[in-house]
Amino acid sequence: MKIAVCVNHVPDTETKIRIGADARSIDRGGVNYMLSPYDEIAVEEGLRIREKFKGEVIALSLGADTHKDTLRKALAMGADRALLLKDDGVRDSFGVAFGLARELQALAPDVILFGKQSIDYDDAQVGTLVAELLGMPSVSVVTKMEIEDGAVVCEREIEGGKEIVETKLPAVFLAQKGLNEPRYPSLKGIMAAKSKPIEEKAAAAADLQVEALHLRKPAGKSPGRIVGTDRTAVAELIRLLHEEAKVI
């Protein structure tokens, strides 16, 4: 079975993000990057599918040379090979999806895995856009999946509950937290990943659909107020919650 896992290179969750001088992008100076956590779950699921059905796991990423660090993390976890679709420019979700879809069409994998969303812009569009461009079924926010004779039964999160859906391969799946617990790369895997080649190709050009006009940080929180220290303050607290905060 051929399994493709699409991964993204994102700022570390502990990195303090600053807006760049152009006010349209982030200042990348001093920013540490990592494999997007939901994509890490997707890599783990790809490895588990390979362990059950044999075959190979191919990790793909679209971006600049810096994305090689993330691809090496996927290789260290156990991916068989890695492919970087190079583009040093800025792409919107459609542009990323278009480039990935072009390569995935040539690879013709049985299973395509994404994280449910990337933690940089959090728009959760790329995986489902790829499925649409390829004309494949897709299942998002997957917390459980079982493959049997080309059919896949998935459990996915919905508002207030769970949904069970069935589809057939080839298909696209977007991993949610709870699908599995990603493994830690072994020392042997880390050392092997350093010597594995990463294939490079130019990413297919795409007309962008969205342009970032301006970035700004959210307004700081207003300071808290103490309206009293005993039960006599209850009435005033209720009034403020009703008239100012408007939460009751």
Image: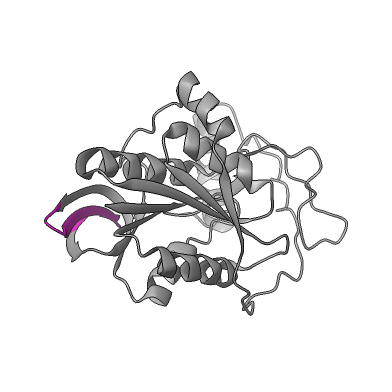
84 or 173, which lies in front?
A: 84
Q: Where is residue 220 in the image (x, y as percent from the top left)?
A: 73, 47
By what rule are the colours in the image chosen?
Answer: one colour
> Residue 128: where, in percent of width, then height?
41, 67
Queried whether the magenta region covers residue 162, the answer comes back as yes
Asked if residue 33 is positioned above or below residue 155 in the image, the reply reads above
- Give the residue at x 43% y 68%: 106
Q: Can residue 160 be seen in this view?
A: no
Residue 93 in sight here: yes
Q: Is residue 43 left or right of residue 10?
A: left
- Return the residue found at the far right: 21
Quarter location, residue 214: bottom right
Is residue 183 highlighted in magenta?
Answer: no
**Image quadrant assignment for residue 233:** top right
Where's residue 240, x and y in %?
Answer: 57, 49
- Residue 86 location in percent, x, y? 65, 59
Span shown in magenta = 148-164
129 relative position to 233: left or right: left
Quarter of the image for the C terminus: give it.
bottom left
Q: Which residue lies furthest to the top in this view?
A: 187
In the image, residue 186 sits, relative to residue 91, either above or below, namely: above
The prevailing secondary structure element of the residues shown in magenta is strand
- Residue for point 73% across, 52% down: 219
In this view, the residue in front, 129 or 151, is: 151
